[in-house]
Image (cartoon, grey):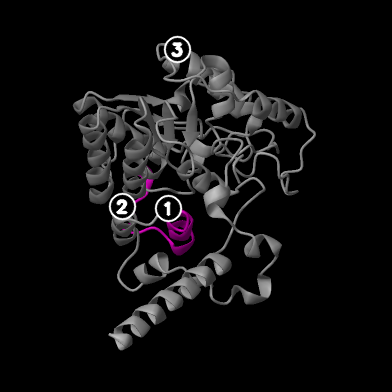
Amino acid sequence: MKKAIKAAAFIIIAAAIFFGLDRLLVRKSLYGWWNMTTKINGFFNSDNDRYDVVFCGSSHAYCSFNPLVIWEETGLDSYVIATQKQPFWASYYYIKEAISRQHPQLIVLDCYTASKEEEYTDDATNYTLCDDFPFGINKLKMIYDCAPPGKRFDLLVRFTKYHSRWSELGEEDFGFRPDKLCDWLNGYCMLTQTKADVQKPYIGDKDLSIPLSEKNTEYLKRIIALCREENASLLIVKTPSNETASEHAYYNFVAAIAEENDISFINYNDLYRQIGIDMNRDFFDSAHLNHRGAEKFSKYFAEHELKSMSPRAASDYTLQLARYRREYSGDYNPFVLKPEFLHRADG
């Protein structure tokens, strides 16, 4: 009996040390434009049944949908759980977690990665997808789908990937409390630089359709089935991104799948004039909206897609909106840590 107790104590102590080192060494993106550690943990730290609308997809989603603007226009509480190059199979598990925690009225999926043919996403994308996703069956399944054999263990046990970070450790590593993080922008990435004279590529045959990869098709249909099963409305979109001709053809195939399943699809690359997008002022680079473009797009989206919805509960973003307006006007350095709204009030 004593041997068993000692063995159990050893296992508990070893596990505590291991998980402590794992938390210490993991890469952390806490501030700046792409503070994904804060944004993703901020969502999973949120109170249950809080958000009326959840946006997901790639970077095209997190630089386009501004929940503060949407709240100002509609009173709806929303969050963006997008990550860079998020494939449909990762979106599926993010949506599954979002529905189980939030039961949102509406899921909005940006379909940029429909144009990608790869069977697995690259290492950098996978770490962004998996590092801050809560442990559980959905994470295990997502890791299996995101990475080929031989690369899955590092996504599950982060210590094996980041064990060489000892020389980089700083104050934010030793004081890291992921369970207390909250993002004052609700997942939106506020890009404040401007690329002038952005050009829209020539599309040519706008009716051309290119079939999605087998894996993309499977997971898009699984997302549709999941939302239907959970009584969550689904809207598939392509946010303004200056699509290429081939991307447009893939999106046409997405539109066909949506139509077959009685799901709405909107390609906002066709609606620049209605949105009021200025090609000289509203893009951060050739494919992502900056803060001016996102404000215009979010207002347009709120007016045309969300006006019929009613918030489930009253929410108050007055302080965050005031900060947003201040930084929108130009008083903003995104790479200086500003602790306000970084942590939960109880933390």
Residue 330 covered by magenta stretch:
no
User: On the image, numbered disc 3 is attached to which residue?
Assistant: 307
Residue shown at 40%/39% (left/top)? 247
For marks 1 and 2 on the same chain, the one whose residue lies earlier in the sequence: 1
Q: Quick one: label 3, few (<14), some, or many (20+) residues within 10 Å? A: few
Instruction: Please provide the residue range marked out in magenta.
Output: 114-133
Of the residues tagged 2 and 3, which is closer to the observer?
2
Is label 2 in a helix, a strand or a loop? Answer: helix
Residue 280 seen by the camera: no
On the image, the x and y values in percent for residue 136 come to 33, 56
Residue closer to the observer: 182 or 247 = 182
Residue shown at 55%/15% (left/top)? 73
Left or right, residue 329 beside residue 85: right
Residue 1, image quadrant: bottom left
| Vertical placement of residue 303 versus 169, above or below | above
Query: What number is the disc on residue 138?
Result: 2
Query: What number is the disc on residue 133?
Result: 1
Residue 118 covered by magenta stretch:
yes
| Vertical placement of residue 99 versus 325, above or below | below
